[in-house]
Image (spheres, rainbow, N blue to C red):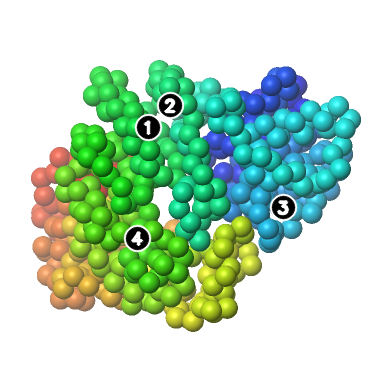
Amino acid sequence: MNTSANIILSTLNARYTHSAIGLRYLLANMEELESRTCIREFTINDNIQDVAEKLLACRPAIIGLGVYIWNALECAELLATIKKVSPETMVILGGPEVSYSPMRVNFEAADFIIQGEGDTAFHDLCKALLGGLRPNTRIIQASPADLLAIKLPYTYYSDDDVAHRYIYIEASRGCPFQCEFCLSSIDEKVRHFDIEIILHALETLWQRGVRSFKFIDRTFNLNIKVASRLLDFFLQKCASPDGPCFVHFEVIPDHFPEALKARIAQFPSASLQLEVGIQTLNPEVASNIHRNLKLAKIKQNISFLAHETAAHMHLDLIVGLPGESLASFGENLNRLCAMTNSEIQIGILKKLSGTSLVRHDAAFGMVYSDKPPYDILKNDLLSFDDIQRMKRFARFWDLFYNSGNFKQSLPLLWPDGDVFQAFHAFSVWIYAQTQSTWKISLERLAELLFQYLLKQEHEAAPLAATLLADLLKLEGRKIPNFLKPYAHAKPDLSTQRASVFNKRQIRHT
């Protein structure tokens, strides 16, 4: 830590392995104040008073705090603590959670709030404050940054970041689509960084030892020229003796020209991850929320990715969209599972400040929580009990289906192909046994699945063999106690060793 710093940039990340690219943008653009500025990152699980103590230890004049939906409540508590024990310390907030109205968390104690892209606005405010000039307004409206002029953040990832954290990259900002649940739709113009500078930065990170890259662009495959250059870069790295390489992109599902397909098909297993925004396959629901839905193209592209490439996919579905019944959601899930056995992330609808989703509240009886993440509680088609069950469904789906731990055994739940109904019944049964969706060990999950399938009249010995094949897929795992009586059925497996960043992907192969 820079002990002479009197400006501290901080946030509370969701996990230690995450890193805040926003703080690094701010530091990169602090100009003459850079030597007086440092970054201190924490997690939402840290004790807030301990965090305050560490931030105030070097008596900073200014603390800049990044506020997001996942840390809003903790940041509010941290803000209040800092201002109570050190009222002279100026606290400046920024980030999506304070950039739009209404603010549903109390941040009144903040000295200033920067709304919008603060890449250079934070420097300008700090310079004024340290020079004795106090702006007339507490809320600073920042203009969109000039992406060709601002300094990039990538040299500000530390060696510890490189060794232990995800390295986030962006080649563009904005999204041309108008999906009403998404903040990215507010910035409809897509702006790109200079691709040559991005490629140079990627090469520098590679030389420093980075092997896992996560792009945060909302529509990576929109600009084919830029996407092709990036894919070529990572294909070269995957083929180099210094590999392996892992890269994550967020893509729109209906735009995969042949130039992209040819490149994506060349990536080896567990090296390329694509997050594919589906959200709904119901045309009427998609129309309600201004969601672009080209079903034929979506089906064609998902089929290509699933059957002609080794890309690992995350396909997103949302529960609670206006006009989407439980039956409609179930049909969406069944259709996606019929297209691919890739991960399907099930999210619960959230009403984010700044989006136009609010216009549906009266017509569809939309009722949301007032606390982050502002998730839906009920609407005219889904009761509160329905939503609660679907939250548990989503959690258990992640533990069993998306984890990749039960690739062979889990499909035994739905021999007739009705994935939604079968897993819904299973999730209700699991919760009845556990009364919890958290801190359930892998062995306990496997035992629950074993017990449930036995109730469905599966024979114990072949079922145990299938579970063992799933569980022992990765190197270092032991036979669960409940399966030891069936150990003679253990298959001859060639287990795989996974890196810290792609264990889940390898379990799906």
Q: How far apart are labels 3 and 2 at the CA level? A: 40 Å
Q: How far apart are labels 1 and 2 at the CA level? A: 7 Å
Q: How far apart are labels 3 and 1 at the CA level? A: 42 Å
Q: Amino acid at mark 1?
A: Val
Mark 4 / mark 1, whichever is N-terminal:
1
Q: Amino acid at mark 2?
A: Ile
Looking at the image, residue 6 sits to the left or right of residue 335; the answer is: right
Q: How far apart are labels 4 and 1 at the CA level? A: 24 Å
Tag 4 residue: 293
Tag 2 residue: 195
Looking at the image, residue 131 sits to the left or right of residue 43; the answer is: right
Tag 1 residue: 226
Looking at the image, residue 30 sits to the left or right of residue 126; the answer is: left
Query: Residues at badges 1 and 2 in contact (C-beta under 8 Å)?
Result: yes
- Given residues 239 and 451, the one toward you in this image is 239
Tag 3 residue: 77
Depth-wise, is mark 3 or mark 1 nearer the camera? 1
- Given residues 444 and 303, the one toward you in this image is 303
Q: How far apart are labels 4 and 3 at the CA level? A: 41 Å
Query: Residues at badges 4 and 1 in contact (C-beta under 8 Å)?
Result: no
Residue drawn at x 51%, y 60% is: 181
Mark 3 / mark 2, whichever is N-terminal:
3
**Local crowd size for mark 4, using a 10 Å CA cut-off: few (<14), some (14–19), many (≥20):** many
Place of residue 140 in the rendered image (x, y in percent of width and height, measured from the top left)? 75, 43
